[in-house]
Amino acid sequence: MELGILLSGSGLAIPSWETGFDLAADMGYTQVELAGNDVSGQGGAPDLGKCDAAEARSLIEAAGARGLGVSAIQSHQCFPLADEAALAASVAHTQRMIDLAAATGVPVVHTTTGHRSPGIPEGTMWRMLCDVYTALLDHARGKGVKVAVEPVFVYSVGNLATLRRLLEVVGRPDLYINYDPSHFPYHDEDPVPPIVEFGDRIVHAHAKDAVVEPDTDGSPRGTESEMPGGRRFRFAPPGEGQIDQVTVVRALRAAGFHGVLSLELGHGVADPETAARKNVPFMRDVLTQAGA
């Protein structure tokens, strides 16, 4: 397995792609994952939503010149939307990221389902998600790009049961998984069973951790989420939460995954650059212990 890092988006914040590539290479990563979430193409952060195919190829070449591969494009949109124009824009943007991946040789575009809009019944939501992912998979067919879904703790697909339901509803073997262990503790779930059940569909993985702790004062905090039973959930860098990273990597290896473990930061991590630097020796030790 190789170590990667998500740049921009919900990853390591960077002023430019080139700065991010330099940082990643200096820290010892061999892969980078690129954010492609900006539907408008007008945001301030580096994002593939601003790029055409020629610009994306130039970025991939710049990463390669620093000895870095590009493991995936993150295209996280919301799909169960009551606003038909917004839904169409989300689908079209994701299809464009698939096209950019195909034009540049990036093997994976991973998605999330997003929240269900108020007023959309659950049955309607599943039909919408089936239609959306069918359209995305049809668009990707023959292009050498794998479309993956990442379960995210508060989204329509956020745990093992809803992941299982989505795969059943879509009914396609070409819908893959971007595995992130950090979302399962919110549901009081072990992160290993999804690997055991769907390991053959995991094509990319995030390295991330999580903490569930008592809510001692009840005050709102922007980087934490309330849980039942007077508890709070927050993300953490690998090794600073409650997830046994060695067990997770060992399970991935047993399932036949030999891809990229891409560090995802943001989400309230106080010093992302320091966390990113510490992650390389930590995860190298994890890989050694896991025999990966």
Image: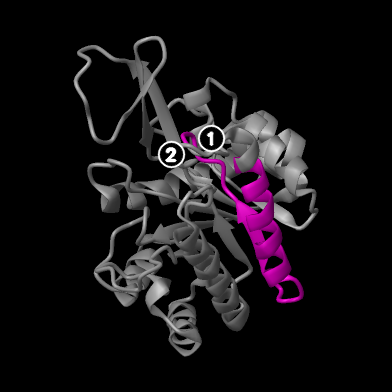
Q: Do the CB atoms of the residues marked 2 and 1 lie less than 8 Å apart? A: yes
Q: Residues within 10 Å of mark 2 (few under 14, many from 20)?
A: many
- Asked if residue 269 lies left or right of residue 240, the reply is left
Precedes in sequence: disc 2 or disc 1: 2
Residue 228 coordinates in the image, percent (x, y): 42, 14
Residue 264 coordinates in the image, percent (x, y): 42, 50
- Asked if residue 201 lies left or right of residue 9, the reply is right
Q: Circle 2 is placed at which residue position?
A: 238
Residue 258, can we see it? no
Picture quarter with the N terminus: bottom right
Residue 150 coordinates in the image, percent (x, y): 57, 47
Q: Residues within 10 Å of mark 1 (few under 14, many from 20)?
A: many
Label 1, secondary structure: give it: helix
Give the magenta part as a residue range: 125-154
Q: Amino acid at mark 2?
A: Pro
Label 2, secondary structure: give it: loop
> Against 157, is 65 above or below?
below
Q: Nearer the viewer, residue 248 or 83?
A: 83
- Residue found at x 37% / y 55%: 11
Residue 6, can we see it? yes
- Residue found at x 74% / y 43%: 169
Q: Nearer the viewer, residue 266 or 134?
A: 134
Any magenta on residue 22?
Answer: no
- Residue found at x 68% / y 71%: 139
Q: Circle 1 is placed at which residue position?
A: 245
Q: Nearer the viewer, residue 237 or 280?
A: 237
- Asked if residue 280 lies left or right of residue 18, the reply is right
Q: Amino acid at mark 1?
A: Gln
- Residue found at x 23% / y 46%: 271
